[in-house]
Image (tube, grey):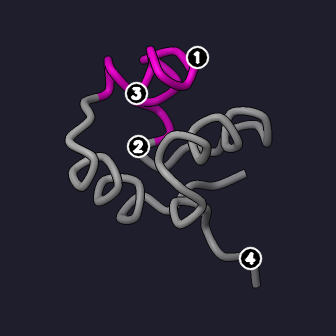
Amino acid sequence: MRIDRVAFAAALARRDINQKRLAELSGVSRVTITAVKSGKTCSEETARKLAAVLGPEIMEKED
């Protein structure tokens, strides 16, 4: 799955969460979070974990 990079960065800023804290809250490794933030795809499970912390708006809209 793809995460919308702009929405992801905005959600982090809005919630004042850094990548280390997001890793702690979501259970997703910092390496994976860095990859997702740079535009790499991730598993559906990872996307769900990140969306649980940051909100569903981070999910890239499917055509």
Q: How far is mark 2 from mark 1, CA to CA?
A: 16 Å
Badge 3 element: helix
The answer to which of marks 2 and 1 sits earlier in the sequence is 1
Q: Mark 2 or mark 3, which has the lower sequence index?
A: 3
Binning the other alpha carbons within 10 Å of mark 3 as few (below 14), some (14 to 19) or many (20 upward) gives some
The secondary element bearing badge 1 is classed as loop
How packed is label 2: few (under 14 Cα within 10 Å), some, or many (20 or more)?
Answer: some
Cα distance, mark 4 to mark 1? 25 Å
Q: Nearer the viewer, mark 2 or mark 1?
A: 1
Q: Amino acid at mark 2?
A: Lys
Whichever of callouts 3 and 1 sits on the residue coming sooner in the sequence is 3
- The amino acid at mark 4 is Glu
Residue at image mark 4: 62
Element assignment for label 2: helix
Q: Please report the bounds of the magenta region as a residue range.
A: 19-36
Which of disc 4 and disc 2 is earlier in sequence?
A: 2
Q: Residue 4: x and y, percent?
A: 50, 62
Q: Please tell me which residue is depicted at 64% across the width and 55% down the height of the picture.
A: 2
Which residue is under mark 1? 27
Estimate the spatial distance between the alpha carbons at disc 3 and disc 1, rounded to whole Å. 8 Å
Q: Which label sits in the foreground, 4 or 3?
A: 3
Magenta stretch holds residue 28: yes
Residue at mark 2: 37
**Quarter-wise, where is residue 38 in the image?**
top left
Give the label on residue 22, or none.
3
Q: Where the C terminus falls, by quadrant?
A: bottom right
SS majority, magenta? helix
